[in-house]
Amino acid sequence: MERAYPNQQNGYRMRYSIVIPAYNESERIIASLDKIVAHMQKKDWDAEILVVNDGSRDRTAEIVSSYSLRHPVVRLLENPGNRGKGYSVRHGMLKAGGEILLFTDADLSAPIYEAEKLFDALHHGAEVAIGSRWLNRKLQIEKQPLPRQLFGRIFNLLLRLTLNLKEKDTQCGFKAFTRLAAEQIFPRQHIERWGFDPEILFLSKKLGLKLAEIPVEWSHDDRSKINPVTDGMRMFMEMLKVRWNSMRGIYEHTAFTMVKAGTREQNNRSLV
Ligand SMILES: Nc1nc2c(ncn2[C@@H]2O[C@H](COP(=O)(O)OP(=O)(O)O)[C@@H](O)[C@H]2O)c(=O)[nH]1
Ligand SMILES: [Mg+2]
């Protein structure tokens, strides 16, 4: 059963929500949570951490659940089985209670202190701030293997052609949103596996939200679970699906609503 986070009582909003999609992350998740909790304490962040277990077949859920007993800022959310990173991020975002919402990969490939750069961009007027590994390549401490980089560049080119996305790095697992932006975007998100990032960016533009791409430090973790061939094909299909969905007008409607209804009327912002 999901525990109510103390800060969510009486309509109070904490400043930050950090959403972490997690599939078979029992080896990596505790080290990452320790780093985030330490950073939160150091910076005196008023925050919650939502770990979304994506039907893991290892002990991720148990480990996170017992960690959350010792650290009540951590909450465990459960997907109904393995549904994909997109589903997991949306699940966490729809349940998050913060004013600023960040999602990060469980391996913390972008160190948590880099979140400050994204938050700064939001503070200075952006509504969506996305981490980028391609704006300043020097910040990549551990680069992805070459075939994966090549795959990324081809995907990026196709995104330019099909969805008119100009960002250098759409796939970076480190993105932050103002609450208002998250309330517009995530209820409209349909793609549930790896191709969800372009859909989010596509929606941001359609909604006329101000987007900033920010170079962040990145250190690739070899234990990546993406299969460039099968996942690549699927991502390509998902990209076309976004275009098709848009043509059919399905983004005009919201499929889900955020958990906190306080600002729901803002959901009616029109699409451009
Ligand atoms: N492989 C995989 N990862 C998922 C899934 N659902 C959520 N994730 C999370 O997605 C994030 C990115 O995964 P990772 O293997 O680090 O990808 P990479 O670093 O981009 O190669 C991690 O936090 C995973 O736990 C899923 O169904 N499969
Ligand atoms: Mg990774």
Image: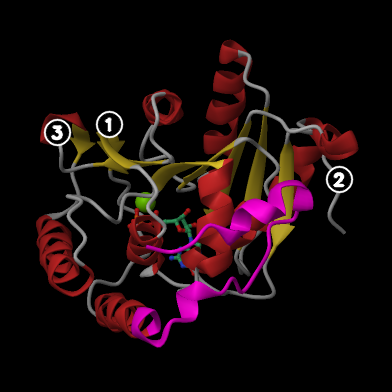
Image: 59 above or below 138: below
Q: Residues within 10 Å of mark 1 (few under 14, many from 20)?
A: many
Q: Nearest the camera: 25 or 71?
A: 71
Which mark is nearer the camera, 3 or 1?
3
Q: Which quadrant of the view contains residue 179?
A: top right
Mark sitting earlier along the chain (1/2): 2
Q: Amino acid at mark 1?
A: Glu
Asked which secondary structure carries label 1, the reply is loop
* Residue 10: image location, x then y, percent: 90, 35
Kindly identify which residue carries mark 3. 136
Q: Nearest the camera: 66 or 116?
A: 116
Q: Is residue 237 left or right of residue 119?
A: left
Kindly identify which residue carries mark 1. 217
Q: Which quadrant of the view contains residue 38?
A: top right
For the residues labelled 3 and 2, the Cα–Cα distance comes to: 40 Å
Q: Label for residue 4?
A: 2
Task: Give the magenta-colored segment's residue range.
Answer: 245-272
Q: Is residue 53 left or right of residue 252?
A: right
* Residue 146: image location, x then y, percent: 10, 56
Q: How many marks?
A: 3
Quadrant in which the N terminus is drawn: bottom right
* Residue 242: image location, x then y, percent: 35, 77
Q: Amino acid at mark 3?
A: Asn
Name the colouring of the figure. secondary structure
In this orientation, does residue 22 appear? no
Is ligand 1 within 8 Å of the beta carbon of the residue shown at mark 3? no
- The residue lying at 19 percent from left, 30 percent from top is 139
Is ligand 2 within 8 Å of the beta carbon of the residue shown at mark 1? no
Q: Residues within 10 Å of mark 3 (few under 14, many from 20)?
A: few
Q: Amino acid at mark 2?
A: Ala
For the residues labelled 3 and 1, the Cα–Cα distance comes to: 9 Å
Image: 40 above or below 266: above
